[in-house]
Amino acid sequence: MSTLIPVSYISLLYAYRIFMYKKAFYKVVLVYMLLRVKSTWVCNAMSLLELSMWLGLLSGIVGVVYVLSLVLYITRTKIVRDTEEAKRAYQIHEYIKSASIAYIKAQYMVILSIVSVISVILIVVGVVMKSSLVLSTGIAYLLGGLSSAMVSITGMLMGVLSNIRVLNVLTRRGLGGALSLAFRGGSVTGFLVGGVGLLGVSGLFIALNGFSDPVSVAQILLGYAFGASTAALFARVGGGIYTKAADIGADLVGKVEVGIPEDDPRNPGVIADNVGDNVGDCAGMGADLFESYVEGMIAPMVIAAVLWSLLKESKLLDLVAYPVIFSSIALLTSIAVAQLISLSPFKEPGRNLTATSILSIVAAAVVNGVITYALAPTIAPAFIVGALGLVAGAIVGFTSDYFTSPQHTPVKIVARNSQFGPALTILSGLSMGFYSTFIPSIAIALAALGSYVIGSSIHASEKLLVGIYSVALAGTGMLAVAPIVVSADAYGPIVDNAAGLAEQAGYEEDVRSLADMLDSAGNTMKSISKGYAIGSAALTALALLFSFASVLASKSNLKVDALMQIIFSAGSEFSAYFISGVIIGVVMVALFTAMVIQAVTAAAGRLVDEIRRQFREKPGILDWKERPDYERAVQIVTFYALRRLVTPGLLALLAPIIVALVGPVTGDWRSGATLLGGLLLGSIASGLLLGLFQGNVGNTWDNAKKYIEAGNFGGKGTETHKAAVVGDTVGDPLKDSAGPAINIMIKVMSVSSSVIVPLILFGI
């Protein structure tokens, strides 16, 4: 609460400035009145579905143009090298940049090869079966993978280019200028998520003439989502392995064994560690939330299209349109809110970023409410459902902040227990991690339930299908402000690298302390965004599960309620299949987690060996007489990350397909569908729990260590600090590798079920 009170004040301050600026409030009222007057004319001239897609296309273009303006601003910010420290910082920055680019190139050669193979298989199947639907799905799949790669690579590259400039600006213009520039650097990733996502969804819908056949085109869009998911899965797994192997390896030898500070240039693993921040947080989070963003729009569109195909009511096409409208308006309001980051008079960057996030939620809700009630009052409950998703996302994010921030009790409890050794550090952290899952899980459950109840009032005769559409739409609402959330998250590795450069280049203490303030704000936002990503993943996966049921209904010519009874085995002969599927789904998440952690452990162990070898064979490194071989450390982590990223990814991709084969084997498609329904439900439930737990417990241990390093409970170098370092090291692969990868795993399994499984069960 101590954080939220000043943050709320900042949000009110922003709102007041907007209210007063050229009497904006009266303009909003005037616009609303004009919309009400013109809504009948607009809807007569162009259906709401057509309007939504062109609005989505235009909003996507605006988002991409905004990103281009940010890129120009960042690249035109000159790097001044007028001191020895600035020259050293630039040299280290060049190491980080070249290593980051080399890794991301190698990673995406692997990823795009996998995406290309799957795309070719789908296209060939479409040609052989003479199915334009499957053929188009294969092409859309490739476009989705390429879109994800573009967002990820561009975001990471701009993050790398921003870090040295942020440090440069910090030394010349102070904290405010550095904060603004760092947030702009993060916004490249954030607004690419929104801009490219809307361009992809709306552009494909228009290009494929979804206005005449929304059912088929919506299903083709699932292929786009599947491609984005596949690329994101491997990027998240590979980036997570790289970043945490480098971090753990560098810390275990540098901080624990040798006793040199973090980011010390004498550590051979320090460049690999800095590279990991970029490939894990910038590239990985961008790919993660890009696929969530597009799936959050596509899943409810599929359900609404199937509903329209059953009843042929024009009103139901408005439901197909609404996810794009909601996301488009939220993107435009987020761009406006992003301009306010430098207006706050407060000196704490974390409060500015949090206030911006809160205001983006409020702005998206208010403007969407005005637009909805003006243009489509008959589906007004859909707006309430979307707003519920926004609220749920805020609850999930700020609960994660409470359990992971050094300002709050949970982190202080873990830090205090570190006085009694690493065992109690681990145990107290575990308990806080499990506590942290309760409120977000309840918030997501209540959002889903509330959405179902409110949304089912839209249509009297099809309450079930409209209800599950509304649950999916809550996911759209939660993800609508993803551009701002991703911007704040991508800000983190930029300022982390800037603080590292300040340390490695030997800047004065006052510069390093300011850089640490920026870095501390980045840690707070990373905690919030990780919780947000995990919570939104669960709701998105649930939406995709319902879209899977809707697709099967359209293929099997069954009513959706009858199909849902089959899939979820409500008193049917397939109950054993469903229960077995749930158990398998729960175990799948545990197996996936084990694979990722094992990969990090193996890579970190190899890096530890290399760093020890360099210290042993080059004793002059510690005396500043010999240069560490940074390149060798980078090569080792790159090799192991690329070698280990494929197996966990294939597990998530192939599991639904293998399970669905039970249908053809038994001769009854219902057995495969039921087993798969259980698998998806089990993986979503366990994925939500383990994802939230791992993300939060890792950040709790990390910030407990930083709380001690700030001078509490004895400070650095004490036994308390060493115990906290153990906890932080254990938590690293949980919060930055396995936990985030689970987000994508459960979504990949759900979306692949909608795209591939109908081919297995029905052959069409």
Image (spheres, rainbow, N blue to C red):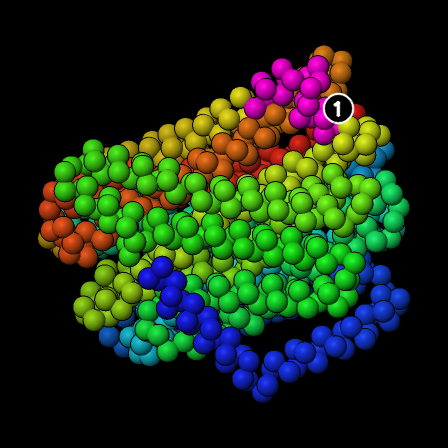
Give left or right: position of 724 versus 752.
left
Judge by depth and name the residue closer to the eye, 343 or 661: 343
Q: Is residue 605 left or right of 572 when viewed as pictured? A: left
Residue at 77% of width from left, 33% of height from top?
A: 560
Viewer-nearest residue: 281 or 590: 590
Q: Is residue 106 above or below residue 681?
A: below
Query: Residue 10 at what x, y percent from top left?
Result: 42, 72
Q: Is residue 332 left or right of residue 374?
A: left
- Image height of 585 relative to 298, above or below: above
Q: Judge by depth and name the residue closer to the eye, 89 or 262.
A: 262
Q: Nearer the viewer, residue 184 or 311?
A: 311
Residue at label 1? 761
Which residue, as the protein is rendered here, is positioned at the far bottom?
22
Q: Position of residue 381 (x, y in %)?
A: 70, 55
Q: Position of residue 178 (x, y in %)?
A: 36, 72
- Figure disc tally: 1
Amino acid type for the residue under numbered disc 1: Leu
Instruction: Give the quadrant of the C terminus.
Output: top right
Residue 473: percent from left, percent from top: 66, 49
Which residues, given as a range, are shown in magenta? 563-582
For the point 15% across and 56% down, the residue is 711
Location of residue 430 with respect to 386 vertically, above or below: above
Q: Is residue 296 visible?
A: no
Question: Does the magenta portion include 581?
Answer: yes
Where disc 1 sits, the SS reads helix
Q: Is residue 415 visible?
A: yes
Give the vertical position of 223 relative to 209 (above or below).
above
Magenta highlight on residue 432: no
* Residue 274 appears left or right of 318: left
Q: Quadrant of the N terminus?
A: bottom left
Which residue sits at x=35%, y=62%?
3
